[in-house]
């Protein structure tokens, strides 16, 4: 019996630790050959010396289990590095079939305290990093299609966050980047469908190096129990979205954690007002919108823990 991803090749960025590691191992378990990308810096804010060790260790773990994997040290926020990453997958495995964008950093600060560099660095790694790899993967798939291949197979799985859905007071850079990733995903889904490519995004909840303080005290597992915020709960969804079974899933956003997957609808209009005359006046808008918002429940911008549905353990 063949495995779901047998014969396919994949890139997973930021795969040296945490979510990316779990995703790379899952794709390999399902039969894919994997390029394990990681810049290997020790600080979750992108600080410290780059190191090939995290990516090499995960690639070695895949090979030890009988799979195929190569490591790639590189910062995907650099355009040419992203090109080299896609080129490596093609050189090693003949083609690229799956791209999982996971690499990211955190530089948290309230908007009134955030520096320009703290903003730029997070947006660069998350949003530009997603674009860079998506661009070169899309070029690869489009060129193959234009060369006459009738069975081009492409899957993109991007990593967003509920920080963009619910807001995150101390993460304006991160929330903005994650919202941008959803826009990039839906645009890519529309543009690439004709070439046999799907693009989807996930909002994972997982206890990793990036989120250890965010989730401290929440959903702590009992002795011998699997952590409900383990990355192992997220990786199977990535494996599914990378598979032929998900051919009909495109341009979607899914929240995933601890045995739960939620499909997020596109925003819907909750109320609509029409002017009584040719155009609105300030007074008319005041008479319509002020009562509307006054009648809504207080605190509709929920605290992060309420949105996540988590409880301190």
Image (spheres, grey):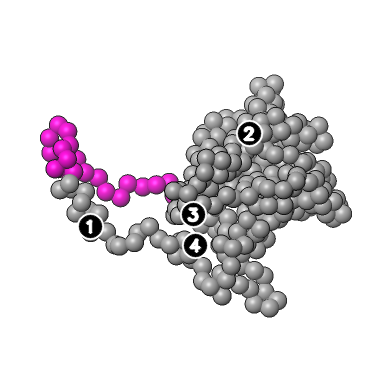
What element does badge 1 sit on?
helix
* Residue 223 as seen in the image, left or right of residue 54: left
- Which residue: 62% across, 38% down? 129
Q: Picture coordinates of residue 224 (x, y %)?
A: 70, 76
Task: Check residue 308 in the rendering and tell me which mark sits there, or answer none.
Answer: 4
Q: Work out which quarter of the rendered image holds the C terminus and state it.
A: bottom right
Q: Earlier in the sequence, mark 1 or mark 4?
A: 1
CB atoms of marks 4 and 3 within 8 Å: no
- Marks 1 and 4 sit apart, C-alpha to C-alpha, by 26 Å
Q: Which residue is mark 1?
A: 294
Residue 189 position by quadrant: top right
Question: Looking at the image, is 145 positioned above or below residue 208?
Answer: above
Q: Residues within 10 Å of mark 3 (few under 14, many from 20)?
A: some
Q: Picture coordinates of residue 12 (x, y %)?
A: 70, 45
Q: Earlier in the sequence, mark 2 or mark 4?
A: 2
* Residue 218 as seen in the image, left or right of residue 242: left
Task: Check residue 132 in the rendering and tell me which mark sits there, or answer none.
Answer: 2
Q: Earlier in the sequence, mark 1 or mark 2?
A: 2
Task: Check residue 170 in the rendering and tell me which mark sits there, or answer none.
Answer: 3
Q: Which residues are magenta?
A: 264-285
Asked if the magenta segment contains residue 266, the reply would be yes
Q: Earlier in the sequence, mark 1 or mark 3?
A: 3
* Residue 61 as seen in the image, left or right of residue 163: right
The answer to whether residue 135 of the structure is visible from this angle is yes
| Residue depth check, mark 1 versus mark 3: number of the one nearer the observer | 3
**Foreground residue among 27 and 193:** 27
């Amino acid at each position: 019996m063949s495995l779901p991803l047998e014969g396919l090749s994949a890139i997973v960025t930021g795969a040296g630790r945490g979510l990316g590691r779990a995703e790379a191992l899952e794709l390999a378990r399902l039969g894919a050959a994997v390029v394990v990308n990681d810049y290997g810096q020790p600080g979750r804010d992108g600080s410290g010396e780059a190191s090939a060790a995290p990516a090499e260790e995960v690639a070695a773990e895949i090979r030890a289990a009988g799979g195929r994997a190569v490591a790639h040290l590189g910062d995907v926020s650099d355009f040419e590095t992203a090109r080299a990453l896609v080129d490596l997958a093609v050189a090693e495995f003949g083609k690229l079939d799956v791209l999982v964008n996971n690499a990211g950093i955190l530089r948290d600060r309230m908007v009134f305290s955030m520096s320009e560099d703290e903003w730029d660095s997070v947006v660069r790694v998350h949003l530009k990093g997603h674009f860079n790899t998506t661009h070169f993967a899309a070029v690869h798939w489009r060129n193959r299609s234009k060369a006459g291949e009738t069975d081009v197979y492409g899957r993109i799985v991007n990593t967003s966050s509920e920080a963009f859905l619910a807001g995150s007071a101390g993460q304006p850079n991160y929330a903005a980047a994650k919202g941008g990733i959803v826009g990039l995903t839906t645009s890519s889904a529309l543009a690439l469908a004709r070439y046999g490519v799907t693009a989807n995004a996930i909002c994972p909840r997982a206890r990793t190096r990036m989120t250890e303080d965010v989730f401290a005290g929440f959903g702590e597992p009992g002795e011998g129990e699997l952590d409900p915020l383990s990355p192992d709960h997220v990786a199977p969804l990535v494996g599914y979205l990378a598979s032929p079974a998900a051919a009909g899933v495109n341009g979607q956003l899914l929240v995933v954690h601890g045995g739960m997957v939620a499909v997020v609808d596109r925003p819907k209009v909750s109320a609509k007002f029409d002017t009584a005359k040719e155009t609105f006046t300030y007074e008319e808008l005041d008479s319509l919108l002020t009562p509307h918002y006054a009648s809504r429940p207080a605190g509709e911008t929920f605290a992060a823990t309420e949105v996540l549905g988590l409880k301190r353990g």
